[in-house]
Image (cartoon, rainbow, N blue to C red):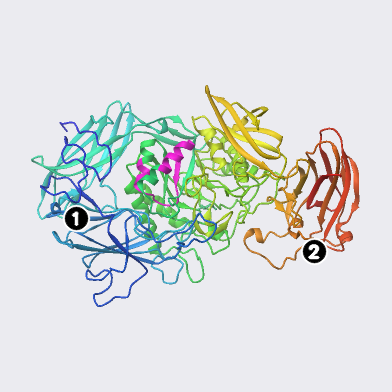
Amino acid sequence: MSSRIHRLNATRLRRIPAAAAIAVGVVSGAASGAWAGERADLPLGAGWRFHQGDVAPGKQGGPEAPAFNDRGWASVSLPHTWNHLGGTAQRTADYNATRGAGWYRLRFTPPANYAGRKVWLQFDGASINAEVWLNGVKLGAHQGAFGRFRFDATAALKMGKPNVLAVRTDNSSPAAAGSPTAEVIPMSGDFFLFGGLYRAVSLIATDPVHIDMMDSGGPGVYAHTASLDGAAGIEVDSRVTNDGAKAQPVVVKTAIVDAAGATAASDSQPLTVAPGTVAEPQQTLTVPNPHLWDGRSDPYLYQVVTRVETAQGQLLDQVTQPLGIRSFRFDPDQGFFLNGKHVALHGVSRHQDRPGKGWAISPADQAQDMDIMLDLGINTLRLAHYQHDQAIYDLADKDGVVVWAEIPLVNRTAPETPEGDKGVTSPGFAANAESQLRELIKQNYNHPSVVTWSIGNEVNLMAAAGHGVSNARPLLTRLNQAAYELDHTRPTTMADCCEPWPDQPKPGVDRVAEITDLLGYNRYQGWYYDKAEDLGPVLDRLHALHPRLPLAVSEYGAGGALSQHTDQVQAGTSQGGVVYPKGHFHPEELESRLHEIWWAQLKARPYLWGTFIWTMFDFASDSRTEGDMIDTNDKGLVSYDRTVKKDVFFFYKADWSDQPVLHLNGRRYVDRAYPVTDVEAYSNAASARLSLNGRDLGAAACPDHVCRWPAVHLDAGDNVLTATAEIKGQSVSDSITWRFAGKPDEIHIRAGASAGLISAAGARYGSDAFATGGEPHDRNPAPEQGRPDKTIPPVTGTPDPKLYETYRAGAFGYRVPVPAGRYQVTLRFAEPMLAAGARAFDVAANGHVVLQHLDVAAEAGGPLAALDRTVTVEVTGDGGLALDFRPVTGPALVSAIDVVPAR
Ligand code: GCB
C-alpha cells in the first residue's frame, strides 16, 4: 500500500473513508451522489411502530403485509424493549414482564445511492427470536437474543419509494409448551430476557463485490498475531464475496495502521473472484518493532484496513478492524501472563440491563458502565452470560481490559421436556448453541481484549438442585471443538458451580471439568452455603484435584440492599445474626464484610488466573424477591441505576485503583441503634484520623485497606464523623452524619437477629452485637425467606413475639459497653422446642451467677412462651457489663438483653 491511510477515529463498520486520503465521515441516509465504493450505513433507529403481542390478520393481511394498518400502534425508537422490571421495592405502574411476541414496523425510503448495490439489513441484536419481512417478502429468521445478524435485502428493496420493514420478535419462555424458543439457549437463568429490537438496526449498501456480509454476523476480515519475536507476524484472513454476474479480478490491499495513522505494514494480493463465490485470501504482514497492547497500562491499538479494489485501483469495499498485538498465556500454578509479564487479573462480571431501559441501552450507557468499572480499578471483565453489544468490547480494547466472552449456555444443556430435564441434548438445541458460539467468535475475533471463549455457565445446576439429570459432556465437548476450529488462538473456558467431589458423587450430576482449557468456579461460600473462610481451602482442594488446569473464580458475591443495615457483622464467624440469601434482609454491611473475607483469601492464591466479582451492577431477575427489592439480584457493587456505589465498591477501589480512596462506611445506616459502635473506613492510606462532632478520636492503621476505630461513643442527636488521611502526598477526607436518638446509657440487644426492631413499648433494639461464642438462630426463618409459614405459632405471653423468635445458643458471652453504674439487666427468653427438664443453664454478670439452673420451659410453662428475668448489676471501672451464659444441660440461650440504668 503506497499512500498513508489517515487515522480513523472510530473503528467499526460505520465510519469508513472512501479512499485512503479522505477524512472520516458517516455516510448518512440523506446522502446522495456518486457511488464512491464506500459502504453506506443508514441507521434505522427512528420512526418505528410497535405492538406488543400478535395481531390477527385483517383484510390487508398481518403486520408483515405492507398494507397493514399500524396507525394504532405505539411510536417508538430503537433501541427498544417492552419489558420493564427490576430495581424497585414494589411493582411500578409500568411494570411489564410479559414474554411473547412483539411486532415492529418501519416505513423508510432508501437513499438514492443505494441503487444498483447490494443492500443488507443488519440487526445488532433482537430478542429472542426474530422474523423479518421487507415489503411483505420474508427475508429470514434468527434465533438467539445476543448475536448480530444480517439479511440480504437487495431483491425485496424498492428504490426511490417507501419500503415497509416488519419484524416479529419473540421472547417467549422456553419452558412454555410449544414455545418457539424451546431449543434456543439459554433455557433458564438468573436474569430476565428482555424482548424486542433492543440494539441498533441498520441498512448497509455495498458493491456486489464486497467483503463478506453473511459470515455469521462477522466483519469478514479476521486478523491475529501469528508470531511475535521482535517483529510481529500478523495473519489476516479475509472473505471476498462476488454477488455479481461475472468473474471479478480484484486486489485485496491490507494495511496495518498505527495509532498515529502511519502504515506499519501492508500487503496486496491480486485474485479473481468467480461469480457467486467467496474468495478467502490470506495475507501475512510483518510489523517491525510492534507497540504491544499491554492491558490497562498501555492499551495500544493498531487498525487493520482491508480494501478490495479493482485491478484499476477503484475501491469496491473496505473494512476496518481493531488490532492489538499481544501474547498471553495461562499457567495452572502462576496464573495469567500478558506479553510475558504476570498480571493478577481482578475484575467483575457485568449484565447489560438498566432500570427503565432493560437491555435497550445507549452507547452513552455503555461508556458510563465502563467508566465506573475503570474507576473501580478492574483489569478484567466477564461479559456474562452472553454476547454483549460491540460497544463494550470496543471500550475494553481501548481501555486495556482483559475480557472473558461467553455464550448463554446456562443451567442446563437440554431442552425442557414434559417430564423435566432428561439430559438429552436435542439436535436443534445443539445447533443453536453452536450457532451462538460461532456468532460470538466471528463477531469478536478481532478484539484484542478477548482472551478466552466461555462455552457455558453452571450447566449442571438444575441437576445439582435435583431437577432432572445433567449429561453435559457431549455438548460441551462438541462446543469446545467448534471453538478451536473457529479460533485456534484463544483457549476455551467455562464457569462451573457443581462439580461433585470424587468421594461424594452426586447421581445425575456429571463432572464437566477438564473439557475446556481453563475453568472458572462460581463460589458462594458464606452466602449460599458453608462459611466465608472456607473459600480458600475449597479452591486449594479444587486446584489439587485439577493440577494442570488453570483456574479462576468466575463468580463470588453477596446481596447488599441500600436500605438494610445491621450493627455488627462478623459473617463467617458466629457473630451477628442470621441472614438468608433468599430472604428479605440483605444488610449492606454483610456484603462488605463477606468481600473482605473472600478477597483476603483470593489475593493470597496466585495460582488463580482471574477473579470476577458477581456482579458489578444490580440486575433484573424476575425469579427474585429479596433484600429491599423485587425482581432484582442485588449482588452489585453499584445500584441498578448506577447512582449509588455501595460501601464494598470502595473496599476494592482502595486495593485496585491508583486513586486516593478514603470512604467512611455505613453512610446509609444513619439512625443508629447503639450508642457505642465501631467506625470503619475503606482506604489505601497507611492510616487515617477520625473526628466526631469536631473531637479528635485519633488515628487508626488501615491494614488490608480497612481502617477501624473500635467502640466509638456517639453523642445524642447528630454525629458528624470526619476521616482524614494523607495518600501519596494528597490530603483526603470524607464525612458522614449519623444520628443517635436513644439514651446514651441504655443498650437493647436483639440476640441472634441481623436486623434491629422497635418493641411495642418503643424500645429500639439493635441487631445482635457484642457477643462472643455461641451461634445465632432463628426459630421462624420462613417469613425472612419470603415464604410465610403460618404453621409456626408465635411466642405467647408477650406483645413482642418477634423479639423472641431469634436467639443465640451455646456457651457464649456478651460484653456490653456501658459506663460504670447500677443497671437493671432484663434477659428475655423463649424455649424454642424442648420440654421442661431438657435444658438448663446459668447466667453470670461480671463473674457473679445471677440466674442459676434456669429451665426456661419449666418456668414459662412450656416452649414458645416468653420468660423475662430482671437482675440488678453494679458495673465498676470501664470494662462494661460481662454476661456469661453457661450451659448445664443442653446449650444456653437468650433472645434479648436490655441494659438500663437502675433508677
Ligand atoms: C450463579 C449464576 C448467576 C447468578 C448467581 C447468583 O452462580 O451463574 O447467573 O446470578 O449465581 O447471584 O446466584
**In the displayed image of the protein, which residue is found farthest to the left?**
312
Queried whether the magenta region covers residue 474, the answer comes back as no
Task: Please state, as top left, top right, bottom left or bottom right, where the C terminus lies in the image.
Answer: top right
Q: Secondary structure at mark 1?
A: strand
Quarter of the figure with residue 596: top right
Residue type at the position of mark 2: Thr
Front-lying residue, 522 or 736: 736
- Side of 330 where 567 appears, left or right: right
Task: Please state, as top left, top right, bottom left or bottom right, where the N terminus lies in the image.
Answer: top left
Q: Nearer the viewer, mark 2 or mark 1?
A: 2
**In the displayed image of the protein, which residue is found farthest to the top?**
729
* Residue name at image x 57 percent, y 44 percent: 542
Dot 2 or dot 1, earlier in sequence:
1
Circle 2 crowding by C-alpha within 10 Å: few under 14, some 14–19, many from 20: some
Circle 1 crowding by C-alpha within 10 Å: few under 14, some 14–19, many from 20: many
| Residue behind mark 1 | 119
As drawn, 410 above or below 322: below
* Residue name at image x 88 percent, y 48 percent: 871
Real-space CA distance between mark 2 and mark 1, rounded to the nearest whole angstrom: 77 Å
As drawn, 328 above or below 410: above
Residue 300, image x and y in percent? Answer: 34, 32
Quarter of the figure with residue 236: top left
Queried whether the magenta region covers residue 383, the answer comes back as yes
Whether pointer 2 and pointer 1 mark residues with C-beta atoms closer than 8 Å, the reply is no
| Residue behind mark 2 | 796
Q: Which residues are magenta?
A: 368-394
- Side of 59 where 793 appears, left or right: right
